[in-house]
Image: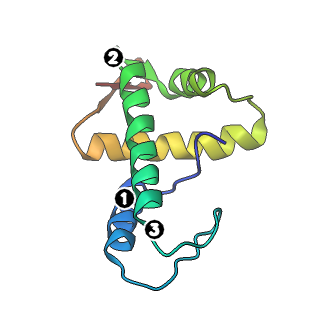
Amino acid sequence: MKVSFIYDVGAYLETLDMVERMEATMFVPAHVDAAADVKELVRYNRDKVQSIAEKILSICKEPICFERILQEVFKGYGLSMNFEQHVLVGSTVRSYLSWLKDTGKLSAGFQDNILLWQK
């Protein structure tokens, strides 16, 4: 999957910072081989978060609702929509939207009782 599930983007980035500062003989990540140096993996994951954030920001040039944002994320990453992906990727995209709003990179407002996001 090109958009991994993240519940809290800010906390995830803080965790990556903490892992990057750790010293150990061996690291055993969940989805890759064990390694003595985890810094490259941390950079990869941090870069992936920034890439997805930039993708979402580019989608939000004009006011846009969540469902359209999700549709554009699926198109942009070549994902196939089904109920499971809608829930998992949708939850992750909501996490990104919340984090981007909290960091001042996105704004959100209501128009005709629809929540719209904009860069």
Image quarter of the C terminus: top left
Residue at which label 3 appears: 38
- Above or below — where is 67 with respect to 49? above
Q: Residue at x 63, y 63 (%)?
A: 32
Check disc 1 and give the amino acid type.
Leu
The image position of residue 106, as x and y in percent, is 29, 32
Looking at the image, residue 93 sits to the left or right of residue 12; the answer is right
* Tag 1–tag 2 contact (CB < 8 Å): no
Residue at 59% across / 48% down in the picture?
A: 4
Where the N terminus falls, by quadrant?
top right
Left or right: 45, with 30 as reference point: left
Of residue 58 and residue 19, the one placed in the foreground of this image is 19
Residue at image coords 60%, 28%:
77
Amino acid at the residue labelled 2: Lys
Question: Which mark is first along the chain, 2 or 1?
Answer: 1
- Horizontally, residue 75 falls left or right of residue 12, namely right
Q: Residue at x 71, y 40 (%)?
A: 85
Residue 23: x, y in percent? 37, 82
Q: Choose top left, top right, bottom left or bottom right for residue 114.
A: top left
Of circles 1 and 3, the one toward us is 3
Q: Nearer the viewer, residue 21 or 33?
A: 33
Q: Which residue is mark 1?
A: 13
Q: Nearer the viewer, residue 95 or 40?
A: 40
Along the polypeptide, which appears first: circle 1 or circle 3? 1
User: Rounded to the nearest whole Å, what is the CA distance between mark 1 and mark 2?
Assistant: 24 Å
Mark 3 and mark 1 in contact (Cβ < 8 Å)? no
Q: Circle 2 — which element?
A: loop
Spot occupied by residue 45 in the image (x, y as percentages of width and height) = 46, 52
Q: Which residue is mark 2?
A: 61
- The amino acid on which the numbered mark 3 sits, given as a three-letter code, is Val
Badge 2 crowding class, 10 Å Cα cut-off, few under 14, some 14 to 19, many 20 or more, is few
Q: Earlier in the sequence, mark 2 or mark 3?
A: 3
